[in-house]
Amino acid sequence: MRLNSFSDVSLRILMVLCVAPEADLSTTRELADAVGTPYNHVSKAVLKLRQMGLIEAFRGRSGGVRITAAGRNATVGGVLRILSDHSDVAQCHGSMGDCPLMPACGLRGVLNHAREAFYVSLDQVTISSLSEPPTSGPITVTLNTSRVH
Ligand code: SF4
């Protein structure tokens, strides 16, 4: 399984917002810098995450977005089910036409079943748990939430 870029950047945004102090608001520009993704892509993901109720926006000169309680408690599986494209795992429909094996193919079904198992395994993982510091190991990695002025 591979995340599409929209899902990937959306999860990155949620992870960054999750570790920001609750009173802090982040602008789209700051998020773009924090997740290393072009502004336009981040802007689209921010809009979608707002529509999903996972982040909330505040207008004004010092406005920005922050994660909601629903966003913290959302599961990775739940987010990916909404944001991922739902095409077949294999390239059954190509530019050269449909795969000739399709009428009797048993692989297509098991691949799609495996994708569902992938989501189910991620239904146990909350967004907030993704940013918890490791409990062991020599290196502590923290997400950058510093504001750029
Ligand atoms: S073999 Fe089956 S799964 Fe693979 S491309 Fe053809 S129809 Fe799709």
Image (cartoon, rainbow, N blue to C red):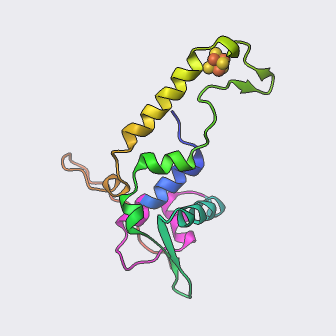
Residue under the point 69% across and 14% down: 103
Point out the quarter of the image occupied by ligand 1. top right
Please say whether residue 144 is visible from this viewpoint.
no
Question: Does the magenta run of residues contain 71?
Answer: no
Question: Does the magenta run of residues contain 19?
Answer: yes
Residue under the point 75% across and 26% down: 94
- Which region of the structure is painted magenta? 15-37
Q: Is residue 83 above or below residue 108?
A: below
Where's residue 134, x and y in %?
24, 50
Residue under the point 47% across and 64% down: 54
Where's residue 138, x and y in %?
21, 48
Foreground: 32 or 125? Answer: 125
Foreground: 116 or 95? Answer: 116
Q: Is residue 144 above or below residue 125?
A: below
Where's residue 18, x and y in %?
38, 64
- Left or right of 100? Residue 53 is left
Q: Quadrant of residue 32?
A: bottom right
Q: Is residue 31 above or below residue 76?
A: below
